[in-house]
Image (cartoon, helix red, strand yellow):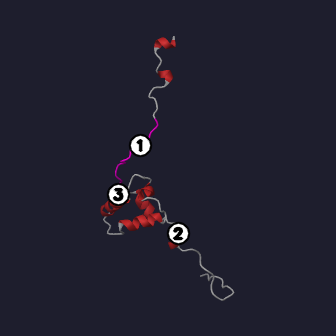
Amino acid sequence: MRVPPATSTGRPAAAAPQDHERFFDARPAGMLVDRPDLTEEDLLNAIAERLVFEGRTGPEPQVVIEAARLGKRKALAFLRKLLLPPPRAPLSMPVRPILREHMSRTDEDMR
């Protein structure tokens, strides 16, 4: 076991930051699963359903979200397994023509 070096006062130097001082992700809960259209309530329901499906009694859904926001690998892996509701927001897709110009020419245009 390594002991931190003593300072001039004889007390040990300050330790490195602990796990509880990790970066906290303050984005909306839907962003944790790359679904900005989901509310925190939607995600809590999906977590609760998954816990019931796996036959688990804990942790509470809010604890899973908080652990994921702290970057805990186990919580992030759990979120990837969720069955999420279908998107409610329309998908933004660029408008593209179905036929290309060379495909729309008739035989007479080719002569």
SS under mark 2:
loop
Q: Earlier in the sequence, mark 2 or mark 3?
A: 2
Q: Tell me the CA gap for discs 1 and 2.
A: 34 Å
User: In the picture, residue 41 is in which quadrant?
Assistant: bottom left
Name the residue at the bottom extreme: 10
Q: Are marks 1 and 2 in contact (CB under 8 Å)?
A: no
Q: Residues within 10 Å of mark 3 (few under 14, many from 20)?
A: some
SS under mark 1:
loop
Q: Residue 18, how many percent across, how many down?
A: 54, 74
Q: Residue 81, how many percent across, how many down?
A: 39, 57
Q: Residue at x 38, y 46 (%)?
A: 89
Q: Tell me the CA gap for discs 1 and 3.
A: 19 Å
Q: Residue at x 32, y 69 (%)?
A: 57
SS under mark 3:
helix
Q: Residue at x 39, y 68 (%)?
A: 63
Residue toward you, 85 or 83: 85
- Which contiguous range is marked in magenta? 83-94
Residue toward you, 76 or 36: 36
The verdict on residue 93 being magenta is yes
- Which residue position is annotated with label 2? 22
Three-letter amino acid code at the position of disc 2: Arg
User: In the picture, residue 2 is in which quadrant?
Assistant: bottom right
